[in-house]
Each structure stands twice: as structure tokens, then as C-alpha cells.
Image (cartoon, grey):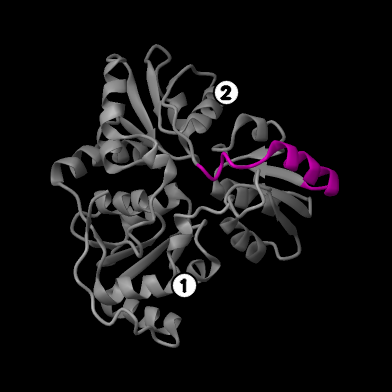
Amino acid sequence: MFVTARPTANLDRIPVDVVAAIQELKQSLNAVILAHYYQDSEIQDVADFIGDSLELSRRAASTDADVIVFAGVHFMAETAKILNPNKLVLLPDLAAGCSLADSCPPDKFAAFKAQYPDHIVISYINCTAEIKALSDIICTSSNAVKIVKQIPPEQGIIFAPDRNLGRYVMQQAEREMVLWQGSCMVHETFSEKKLVQLKVNYPDAEIIAHPECEEAVLQHADFIGSTSALLKYIAQSQRTQFIIATEPGIIHQMQKAQPQKEFIPAPPMNNCACNECPHMRLNTLEKLYLAMKNRTPEITMPEDIRLAALRPMQRMLEMS
């Protein structure tokens, strides 16, 4: 993660109406606030655009704002900086990392890649700038199957870093790939046993799941898709109850879009809030305000890394 943090002052002075203060700063900075579906609902409500990784990448690539405030995790803010080298990109909390991105250290991945010199690398966008720089094409959960299907059948593929998404893409694209064994701590925490019990309690509910979930969970799903695909599905389905096997932050948008329907979060293995991403939830309205007020923490990176990471990002946008 590449960041620049400048000294700040009066960090304890938060306005009473922090939402109004954020709106004022947005105007004075010519800023755009991008938020992922997994953010807290109050952050989603102040964002200019809410989306999954693909949609937010497109928004970052096309914005005419001078400042991009990314309410998400660090790989997302890095992606915005890769696409916008001359813009100020801010991340409210530097500790907002990603267990999946952390599961793929660049040095170890470079050694892994060297074992398959004739393979191309398709990397899920949930990875660091260094991993993107080692990749040939980036993908998201929305477009991974579509991108893999465009690769000639004789061409070997390394897929990184998520093994669960990779396995799902292999099944859907009917294509063998070499998988890096990374995973998301949130999507691996869902309990198959508790999911089955929940289905008994809600027999009319459809189970919808993100492909980062483990295969044991996905086999019970009535629909599997990216966060944006899940939102579209609940709007189109005639059912009125849904069990949601992904980070429950998305339920806020589901309830706003379909208030007459019921959304039940899939249960984790333990009696905890383990199905909530602890990194995503580090961002708060107060930290968002302070980041804009103090114009820090700023995401930066070496230009050679940025350019190397930009090429596979551009290929993704072209192939999507």
C-alpha cells in the first residue's frame, strides 16, 4: 500500500452536522465521494456513487472531479489513483486494508508466476497495485467469466488471488486455470450448517451469494453473482424473502430499492459479527470529513508501478 499522510490539526473538532460539512467540503474541493456497497449505511448515503469494484473503477476513470474520496479499502483507492495520476485520492482510514489482498504478497506471487512462464495472469481487482503490475488483465466478480471466455483455449491462465472466485469462474467458463490460494475472510466465514437451518426457518426465501463464498455455501444458492448482480436480481425476482450470503452492508441498498421485501444476512460460523468486513467498517463519517478537511491520507505510488498496473486495468475496461 502506498500512502502519504501529512500532519493534521484539530482532529477532535468534528462539526455537529458532519453531513452538511462534508457536502460543503465536496463543493469547495470539487470532490467526488465513491463508496462501496459494504460501507456503513450513513457513508453510502453521503456518497455520490455507490457500486461494486467494476462500477467504481468506471466512475474513477471518468470523473472530472479534482479530488476522489474513496470510502472503501486501500486497493480500491489505489485503483482510483492508478486511473487518475493527477488527481488527489484520499482514503479515510489507512488501516482499511483487505484480507484477500493481503493473502497475495507480491514477492511470493512473483515466484509463483515464474513457475508458469507460458501463462498469462488474470487478477481479481481485489489486490494490491504491485499484484496488478504483475498481471496481464484485471477482472472483477462482475466480468471475470466474460473475460476468461475471451482468452484462447490454448492459452494457460493463472488466476489470482481469490481461489473461491477462481473455482467458480472455472466452472462457469468451463476452463482450467492455475489458482493462487488466496481468500476473503468475510466470505469464508459463512456457516453451511447455519445456512441450511436458516432456510428451514424461511422456506420461501431465496439464497443469493457472492462467488467469493466457499463452494459448500454456493451449492445452496439460488443465484450467484457480484454485488451489483445481486441487487439486480432481488429487484427482478418475484420472491419477497432473501438470504444474503455476502457482506451485509449491501442490505442497506437492497432495502432502499425494495422496501417491501425482507433481507436476512447469512450467518457466520461463530456468534459474532464476522460476516461484516472489519476493514470496510473502519471508515466513518467523521474520518471521511477529516480526510477531506485535511486532504490526507493521500494515496500515492511510484510511477513505474502505476504504469505497469494501468495496462491490465485498461485491458479489463476494454474487454468489459
Report how far apart the C-alphas of labels 2 and 1 lie in the structure.
38 Å
Q: Which of 183 and 260 is in front in this view?
A: 183
**SS of the residue at dot 1?**
helix
Residue drawn at x 37%, y 15% as measured from the top left = 155
**SS of the residue at dot 2?**
helix
Give the residue at mark 1: 46
Which numbered disc, 2 or 1, marks the residue that appears first in the sequence? Answer: 1
Give the residue at mark 2: 171
Residue drawn at x 57%, y 37% as measured from the top left = 211
**Image quarter in which the C terminus is found:** top left
Q: What stretch is highlighted in magenta?
A: 185-205
Q: Does residue 196 show up magenta in the picture?
A: yes
* Mark 2, other Cα within 10 Å: few <14 / some 14–19 / many ≥20: few
Type of the residue with mark 1: Val
Residue drawn at x 36%, y 38% as measured from the top left = 316
Q: Is residue 41 visible?
A: yes
Does 192 sit left or right of 287 as displayed? right
Residue 181 in the image: state x and y as whole percent.
44, 27
Residue drawn at x 52%, y 64% as measured from the top left = 40
Q: Does residue 254 show up magenta in the picture?
A: no
Q: Nearer the viewer, residue 135 or 143?
A: 135
Does 291 sit left or right of 223 as displayed? left
Type of the residue with mark 2: Gln
Quadrant of residue 290 within the rendered picture = bottom left
* Mark 1, other Cα within 10 Å: few <14 / some 14–19 / many ≥20: some
Quadrant of residue 178 within the rendered picture = top left
Does 220 sit left or right of 256 as displayed? right
